[in-house]
Amino acid sequence: MTRRDLLLGTASCFAGMAWTLEAVAASNDAFEIVRTEAEWRRLLTPVQYAVLREKETEQAGSSRLVREKRRGTFHCAGCDLPVYSSRAKFDSGTGWPSFWAALEGAVGTREDNSLFMRRTEVHCRRCGGHLGHIFDDGPPPTGLRHCINGIALKFVRSPV
Ligand SMILES: [Zn+2]
């Protein structure tokens, strides 16, 4: 073993430690469903993965759920938790499925200061999957607009 190997060994050891600390910090969010990146990649389509796990935003108007008007429940595409009801859905004209409220206790929020904007990020309470953002220009009764990526949702129609 050369001195160079030793130094490199030390460096990767520190890198491993940093990763461990990060993993601990993330687990403090304490989501009920925790999966590795590889597991999520297996379970989700590439676009679902980009939105739910990497907080990407789907192209406006790309989801057929924008025009979904039937009665039913919208589930998290990551873990199947019911997160939004068709009763709170409205047409925002933005090209993304929009709701004035989530189902009670179904989502969590955090400040998002990316893209030079101050926004409220909304995610699934159970698996932490990114759903979209909440704005305060929505209709009554809440005045909120949950702007949600359709690809992060699965529509389950209510039995008539
Ligand atoms: Zn979920």
Image: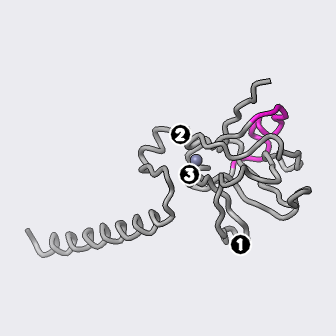
- Is 113 above or below relative to 79? below
Q: Secondary structure at mark 3?
A: loop
Label 3 near ligand 1 (CB < 8 Å): yes
Residue 109: x, y in percent? 66, 63
**Residue appearing at x 15%, y 73% in the figure:** 6
Q: Residue 3 lies in what quarter of the image?
A: bottom left
The Cα atoms of the two marked residues, 3 and 1, are separated by 28 Å
Q: Secondary structure at mark 2?
A: loop
Main SS of the magenta segment? loop
Dot 1 amino acid type: Phe
Q: Secondary structure at mark 1?
A: helix
Camera-nearest residue between 154 and 64? 154
Q: Is residue 55 left or right of residue 37?
A: right
Marks 2/3 in contact by CB < 8 Å: the verdict is no
Q: Quadrant of the N terminus?
A: bottom left
Dot 2 amino acid type: Leu
Give the class, few, some or many, for how many residues have Cα within 10 Å of label 2's Cα (few <14, many ≥20): some
Q: Quadrant of the C terminus?
A: top right
Q: Is residue 111 left or right of residue 68?
A: left
Dot 3 amino acid type: Arg
> Of label 1 and label 2, which has the lower sequence position?
2
Marks 1/2 in contact by CB < 8 Å: the verdict is no
Q: Is residue 9 left or right of residue 103?
A: left
- Asked whether residue 57 is drawn in magenta, I would say no
Residues rendered magenta in the picture: 58-72
Give the class, few, some or many, for how many residues have Cα within 10 Å of label 1's Cα (few <14, many ≥20): few
Kindly report which numbered mark, 2 or 3, lies closer to the viewer in this rendering.
Answer: 3
Residue 95: x, y in percent? 82, 46
The residue that disc 2 covers is 44
The residue that disc 1 covers is 116
> Of label 2 and label 3, which has the lower sequence position?
2
